[in-house]
Image (cartoon, helix red, strand yellow):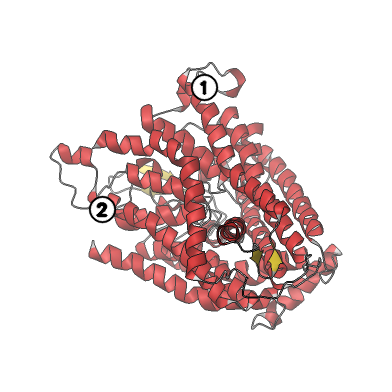
Amino acid sequence: MNTELIGIISIFIVTIVLAIPIGRYIAKVYSNDKTFLDPIFNPIEKFIFKISGINSTEEMNWKQHLKALLSVNMVWFFLCFFILLFQGSLFLNPDNNPSMSPDLAFNTAISFVVNCNLQHYSGETGVSYLSQMFLMFLQFVSAGVGMAAAAMIFNAMRERATDKLGNFYNYFIKSCTRVLLPLSAVVAVALLFSGTPMTFEGKDTITTLQGDQVEVSRGPAAAFIAIKHIGTNGGGFFGTNSAHPLENPSYFSNAVELWAQLIIPFSMIFALGFYLKKRKFALVVFGVMTVGFLLLVIPTVISEINGNPAIEKMGIAQTTGAMEGKEVRFGPAISGFWSIATTVISTGSVNSMHDSSMPVSGAMELLAMMVNAFYGGCGVGILNFYIFIILAVFISGLMVGRTPEFLGKKIEAREVKIAAFIAILHPLLILSGTALASYFAANDTAMGFWFDGNATGWLNNPGHHGFSEMLYEYTSSAANNGSGFEGLGDNNPFWNITTGIVLLLSRFIPIVGPLAIAGLLANKKYIPESAGTLKTDTTIFGVMVFAVIAIIAALSFFPALALGPLAEYFTLK
């Protein structure tokens, strides 16, 4: 067990150490400074802009950024929807996987466009190789969109008074080519050497140790799995995601995939400090996020190591911890660490089954997504945290009698209203969806078109855990996460359509809000720092931001957590 803990600590420290130079590099990319990859990517980017007819040097205001962002996402959604709808009749389908139903294609297309990858299908049997490749394309561009939005926020915070905040397409293409692509290539090569397949051939026949002949799915998995983690996407090439022995063959590949999903969220925080030339502020942000992360990780790892008290009462020794739903090649400690990393960072990939997690672990996984501000996904983690910074600045200013200012700009009613709306939207979407599903399940409602049978049919687990499954599904959708308590029967019109709507609203409105706030603040007159200015690069301000996050999350979600995983915990006791 000590070896497992050393492995967790080592991966975490190595990621932080490497995130600093990568963050410096990302800051240079967004500042248009020279980098060592310029000779490779300058010609590629010029070619892309030439054939697309886009002027990458044209400055945009925040509204133009938003228009470009929403337009390209709409095009990708319709392309993906039609490919999934007709994949059974299209090429690159050696296993003859069928086309998706309209509601499943709707959910899947939205899910990959918004960087969530909530999969209501089983990876290797649900989509063709053509669909997998287009979904892989979406994993690149959805991550690039989030990073481009964060770059605009960086620019708005740096400029003293302007409505010109760079060019969306420039930030977007550079995020994909200069950051996501090189890192994905490194991870894909590491996975190839670990034994992950990379082929366009169909299923292979193997003979098991007990002599059975079985068909094993293959495919261009290594490239898909690399960007799924680097881009904090999380969609598994295989149905069991990173618990699958071909998707995550060994402890080494497990460490690589953990590093891959952590590296860009960490690096973006350091990039903020380098870009603004305010490294102390970035360290405060990173410190707040890390404290929150550790407060979620430590109880989870301890809970998984200690095992299940119900099994202990039966007199069964659990020397390796809680192993239900875990892979023996990983163990419970690093599986618990992964479960928090993937929910905090909004990756959503799994190397164990979260539905089998101990109740404390399930509560921490849910809380990680409910808070949705510790590290976060590619780019959007910064956007979510930016909302809490605005609220903390406003509340702190009221408490000490100072004018709320952030980086030389006054925080006024309009910005606070937008921030408050975004902060309230997240729990509203989660709790409204859960309440609706719970109402139907509690009344065993006949669902008609929406579900084949009565509502209780989508629950494999009754009571507190069944409620947790429904709560987790909407929380995962609203947090753009994609993981699930998979005891829930979710491939039906009710869950496909309702979670699809939540996915849309929870992706784009929280992008619109921070972009609007940043654009409004950037256009204001710069106020030089004075004795009355509230400093935002201090430990005290970091504590204030953490308190705002904790209070909003606790007040909003504690009753739901009490009905689900916490009630289950006390039942086991």
What amino acid is labelled 1 in the image?
Phe
Q: Position of residue 313 (x, y in %)?
A: 16, 38
Residue 65 visible at all = yes
Camera-side residue of 302 and 129? 302
**Of callouts 1 and 2, which one flags the residue occurring earlier in the amino acid sequence?**
2
Q: Position of residue 476 (x, y in %)?
A: 52, 44
Q: Nearer the viewer, residue 33 or 89?
A: 33
- For the question of whether residue 216 can be seen, the reply is no
Label 1 Cα crowd, 10 Å radius (few <14 / some 14-19 / many 20+): some
Residue 59 in the image: x percent, y percent?
83, 68
On the rendered image, what quadrant is the C terminus found in? top left
Q: Please identify the residue farthest to the front as the structure is shown.
A: 401
Quarter where residue 119 is shown: top right
Per the model, the C-alpha gap separating discs 1 and 2 is: 36 Å
Q: Residue at x 78, y 65 (%)?
A: 524
Q: Secondary structure at mark 2?
A: helix
| Residue assigned mark 2 | 305
Quadrant housing residue 570: top left
- Residue type pointed to by label 2: Ile
Residue 55 lies in quadrant: bottom right
Badge 2: residue crowd in 10 Å (few <14, some 14–19, many ≥20): many
Disc 1 designates what residue?
440
Instruction: Return the x and y of residue 454 as percentages of the image width and height.
Output: 50, 18
On screen, 455 above or below 565? above
Q: Is residue 256 above or below residue 477?
A: below
